Amino acid sequence: MKNEKWETVSSALRFVDDHLSVETEAVTTPARADAREWTVVHRKSAVVIAAMTVEGKFVLIRQERIPIRQTIWEMPAGQVDQLCGSGSFKDVALRELREETGYELAPGGEAIFLGDFFCSPGFTDEREFLFLLKPVRRSTAGQAHTQAEAIIDCREFSPDEITAMIAEGTIRDANTLSTWARLLARKLVRVG
């Protein structure tokens, strides 16, 4: 009889720190009764924020990214350490927006959940939860990011500017590209 579920037969921890763990796992799948060995990076979930001003511009940050040795423009995002009490992914998105950009949701503003995606399911189970926060405004408290984040700049861009940045290859991170695609698909932003 064919195995109708995913089952971890064995796992060996290779590395662990505060942000991720690396394991080699042997797993049976619904299509394969023989265990298949795979190295998996387990990583915390994250939120990605499309922050739209009352003028219809989007707030992006420019951040140094050591793994790719580049400084890139991207939408604010952050890992979900844990949801405490009545906390939610929306609460994390609101906090990350304020910390990374110095913006906050304006009174009467709304947080729209856009869905989620897996950033690179070939090697990691990391899951991104996407939000549109609108309208946002500058917070009187300003930014509160840490030096570890290496945020160099924060600016507002029109939808046409963002589309051009994507077309030119200026914006290349999966979080921003996926969030922008979701905004366009749901007709929550107009270009052109």
Image (tube, rainbow, N blue to C red):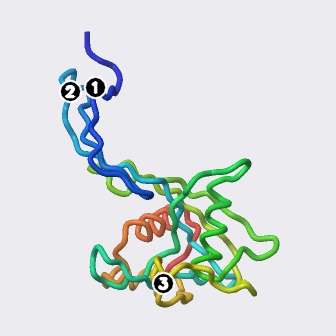
Which residue is depicted at the point 56% across and 58% down? Answer: 114
**Residue 141, placed above or below residue 111:** below
Q: Quadrant of residue 176?
A: bottom left
Task: Please provide percent x and percent y for residue 146.
Answer: 54, 79
Looking at the rendered structure, which numbered label has been put on residue 87?
none
Reading the image, the residue beneath label 1 is: 9
Can you name the residue that lies furthest to the top here? 1
Which residue is depicted at the point 43% across and 82% down? Answer: 63
Q: Nearer the viewer, residue 24 or 17?
A: 17
Mark 1 / mark 2, whichever is N-terminal: 1
Q: Dot 3 surroundings within 10 Å: few (below 14), some, or many (20 or more)?
A: many
Does residue 116 appear left or right of residue 164 in this picture?
right
Reading the image, the residue beneath label 3 is: 151
Which residue is depicted at the point 61% across and 73% down? Answer: 97
Mark 1 / mark 3, whichever is N-terminal: 1
Q: Are marks 1 and 3 in contact (CB under 8 Å)?
A: no
Q: Are marks 2 and 3 in contact (CB under 8 Å)?
A: no
Disc 3 is placed on an element classified as: strand
**Residue 86, placed above or below residue 75:** above
Task: Please provide percent x and percent y for residue 159.
Answer: 51, 81
Q: Quadrant of residue 29?
A: top left
Does residue 49 appear left or right of residue 54 in this picture?
left
Reading the image, the residue beneath label 2 is: 35
Three-letter amino acid code at disc 1?
Val
Figure label count = 3
Three-letter amino acid code at disc 2?
Ala
How far apart marks 2 and 3 lie (CA) works out to 43 Å
Q: Nearer the viewer, residue 170 or 11?
A: 11
Q: Dot 2 surroundings within 10 Å: few (below 14), some, or many (20 or more)?
A: some
Q: Dot 1 surroundings within 10 Å: few (below 14), some, or many (20 or more)?
A: few
Which residue is depicted at the point 56% across and 82% down? Answer: 59
Disc 2 is placed on an element classified as: strand
